Image (cartoon, grey):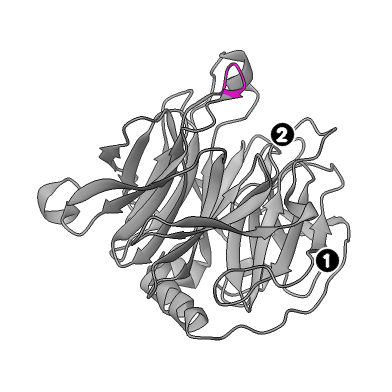
Amino acid sequence: MSLLRLISTLTLALGAFATPLDLSIASKTSSGNLPVTTVHQFSPGTWVEGIDFRWNGKLLVNILTSPDMYQLDTSSGQTQHVTTISNATGLYGITEVLPDQFYVASGKLNLLAGTTDIGSWAIHHVDMSTFDFTGKPRSVSTVTTFATAKINGLTTLDPIRGLVLACDDKNGVVYRVNVYTGENVIVADDPLMKPVANSTVKNGINGIKVRDGALYFTNTGAGTFNKVPINKDGKQTGPGVTIATNPEKKGGDDWTFDVNGNAFIGDNPNNWVNLVRAGSHNTEIIAGGPNSTAVLGPTCLEFGPSIQDRKRGSVYVGFNGGIGQYSTGQYTQGGGVLRLDTSSLGVCQ
């Protein structure tokens, strides 16, 4: 989370919650493919699952196929190992609550076997305030654990009170976590969050963000982009609404808003990035595509904070290298981070 986005989150926390406008389902169009720049690619079999920017413009990268976090210099493409989370096999979502205070989700899973160890999921605090001087976090500690949840996406609700929202993609609910006390409680539970019984993708709710008094989220198994109204404590106050749906009826991992409310969505397990413009019900492929290898398994997105990034409209995309290889064990592509320059789309981040 950049400093500007942290200020925006603080504004929401202080009461800028408005009742959202109801939207409806629509179809997919294409706005043309953007050029794709590879910033860094890890070795084959390395799945990038979560990313978030530090105040200094360095990008933190969570790995799903090992419980490791890296720091990436998006200018040079160089990486530096940050930490390995204990009692886990992989890392999921990441969010910044206060500057250099990051929270990450972890758990135990076996991608090859398609199994998860329910009861292993937890959220950890990674204090990066000393990293630039010592080359390691000031501290890494466990904040809270979950008995039955499979935690995926995280987002900051209220940095002053230390409130984070965490979605459970197995049971289709959202928890509110107090990162200062460790309390976690379910605050949202909607049919649009649930896994789809007949889908080939078993995940339900995945990437989550808060904006204008609503919790926005993808449902990977349904291929939908949705929202539910919430109050300042994160509690759901009304039924969910589907904004847009993939014709494929699957896809949609983590994602990000620009400042104007346009949603840029990593469409993993599909191989493209979607754009849902503010006020629109359509999904537009802006990079990759059904017959393209340019963007293999995009899982997460964040806009770059530098002056050059803002001029280009640069959004950074974490990817897994193609999801099929993780069920066969025949690894041909490593995951990594790509850059898309979105200024030509006529939207502003």
Camera-nearest label, 1 or 2: 2
User: Mark 1: which amino acid?
Assistant: His
| Residue 257 in view (yes/no) | no
Q: Residues within 10 Å of mark 1 (few under 14, many from 20)?
A: some
Q: Going 38% across and 65% down the picture, which residue do you hit?
A: 97
Q: Which residues are magenta?
A: 111-115
Corner quadrant of residue 3: bottom left
Q: Going 48% across and 46% down the picture, which residue do you hit?
A: 50
Tally the numbered discs.
2
- Up/down of 103 relative to 4, above or below: above
Q: Going 79% across and 53% down the picture, which residue do you hit?
A: 191
Residue of label 2: 202
- Up/down of 98 relative to 117, above or below: below
279 horizontally vs 298: left or right: right
In the rendered image, residue 158, in percent from the top left (x then y), is placed at 45, 72
Q: Tag 2, which secondary structure? A: loop
140 or 325: nearer the eye?
Answer: 140
| Residue 206 in view (yes/no) | yes
The quarter of the picture where the N terminus appears is: bottom left
Residue of label 1: 281
- Up/down of 241 relative to 108, above or below: below
User: Mark 2: which amino acid?
Assistant: Lys
223 horizontally vs 268: left or right: right
Q: CA distance from mark 1 to mark 2?
A: 24 Å
Q: Residues within 10 Å of mark 2 (few under 14, many from 20)?
A: some
In the rendered image, residue 12, in percent from the top left (x then y), is placed at 52, 80
Q: Is residue 174 magenta?
A: no
